[in-house]
Amino acid sequence: MADEVKLYRTWSSPYGLRIVWAMHIKGIEYENVFEDLSQKSPQLLQYNPVHKKIPVLVHKGKPICESLVILEYIDETWKETTPLLPQDPYEKAMARFWAKFVDDKLLPSVTSVFTEKGYEAKKEALVPAVQNLELIEEQLKGKKFFGGESIGYVDLVLGWMAFLLDVFEEVIDLKLFDAHKFPLLSGWMKNFCDAPAIKQHLPPRDRLVTKYQLLHEKYQTTSN
Amino acid sequence: MADEVKLYRTWSSPYGLRIVWAMHIKGIEYENVFEDLSQKSPQLLQYNPVHKKIPVLVHKGKPICESLVILEYIDETWKETTPLLPQDPYEKAMARFWAKFVDDKLLPSVTSVFTEKGYEAKKEALVPAVQNLELIEEQLKGKKFFGGESIGYVDLVLGWMAFLLDVFEEVIDLKLFDAHKFPLLSGWMKNFCDAPAIKQHLPPRDRLVTKYQLLHEKYQTTSN
């Protein structure tokens, strides 16, 4: 089966890791194809001519692009294994709403703290990021994971937060996340990273720090 | 049943109209609640506290926000009627990919032609918009609608184009869409607007022209 399922990704992209984690949660055999984004392979450009981005999942020769679309495809194709999305249409709609919120609002707001130049600009960018985190914190009330007792769709979409926030904090030398202010998210981050399907498939922290240090230097020194 | 399903929208929002059309295609009774976005109702703010935007579908007292999320909810809740999304997981993934492309790429690129100041800037903004239209044109090869023989999810998501492009052209006095260059999209626009569920639920053209004339004047005269 491994030759039937290929995942084009990079070692560190949180979008690609969403798919890696989903594959391991559902126990699907697949082959990783690591891309160098500075020199994209002809295969990647052929499979995702519209966005020319990873991740791309190729299943039986047919490509699927966009991580949220891939996650739903995986859940619908390998139905017999651990479900990622709730079955109830309303609960499913809520999961889709919050996944979209993470990608459209939370992730860009946290990223802008990283990319803004200088302490004052970063502090200012932190305000909407914290407001977005507060909205996410509320969604965890009474639950271990966003998916309930086990990791689901929203957990995978938010997964980047569990391992990247403290890398960002180290690199930019600014507190992004106060565990006392966000006790539920703080607990979720630990539970998420401790889950076997995730723990064994997290990028090495030291490599992440090096990567984001270089990226941060670039953002701080180049003009907008 | 009408009292069980309420749709918060405006008379002209393409996002709200996606839901109107879906309800009529599927034959679902519902009540329209028209919002004045300059003075949002307490109900709208209560139902969509995160984005404070229309459309919101309220079903049995529970709100669903974001038009793409609402469309999937409708399709999964009223399963027994005309399906909007394909059943096959791969075809479904393709529909989701193109719907996301319309919202993330095509719609913003066309909107920017409208909002840019002056003829030269508009002509420049037209380049990526036309490239995006070319990608969409390709998807119609061999098909009457994006959904095949009948209107489906991607058709509803792209529906704004069928009735707004020529309104935009009149208002900004610039050709956006060359029917000879896009024969398939041109045919689709006609077929879409002629379908009974759509035709009876399009905003009056003269009101649209007035609305967008005022909006365009605002964009042309205010500083960025």
Image (cartoon, coloured by chain):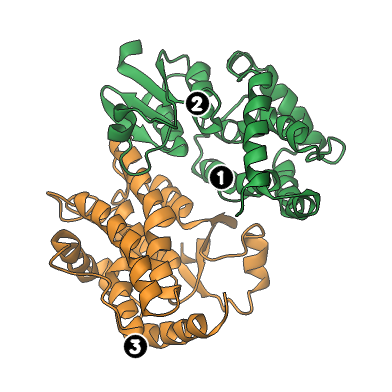
Chain colours: A orange, B green
Q: Looking at the picture, does residue B55 appear above or below residue A170?
A: above
Mark 1 vs mark 2: which is more N-terminal? 2
Is residue A53 in view from this perspective? yes
Q: What separation in Å lies between label 3 and label 2 (alpha carbons)?
A: 49 Å
Local secondary structure at mark 3: helix
Q: What separation in Å lies between label 1 and label 3 (alpha carbons)?
A: 37 Å
Looking at the rendering, which quadrant does residue B142 occupy? top right
> Which amino acid, by three-letter code, is at mark 1?
Asp
Residue density around tag 1, few if under 14, some if 14–19, many if 20 or more, within 10 Å = some
Q: Are marks 3 and 2 on the same chain?
A: no
Q: Looking at the picture, does residue A117 appear above or below residue B50?
A: below
Residue under circle 2? B83
Q: Position of residue B108 (x, y in %)?
A: 61, 48
Q: Give the mark toward the camera: 1 or 2.
A: 1
Q: Position of residue B37 (x, y in %)?
A: 44, 31
Q: Which mark is residue A206?
A: 3
- Name the residue at 53% across, 18% down: B25
> Which amino acid, by three-letter code, is at mark 2?
Pro
- Name the residue at 39% across, 71% down: A113
Task: Please tell me which residue lies in front, B213 or A197.
Answer: B213
Q: What separation in Å lies between label 1 and label 2 (alpha carbons)?
A: 21 Å
Residue under circle 1? B103
Looking at the rendering, which quadrant does residue B52 occupy? top left
> Which amino acid, by three-letter code, is at mark 3?
Asp
Chain ID for label 3?
A
Q: Position of residue A209 (x, y in %)?
A: 37, 85
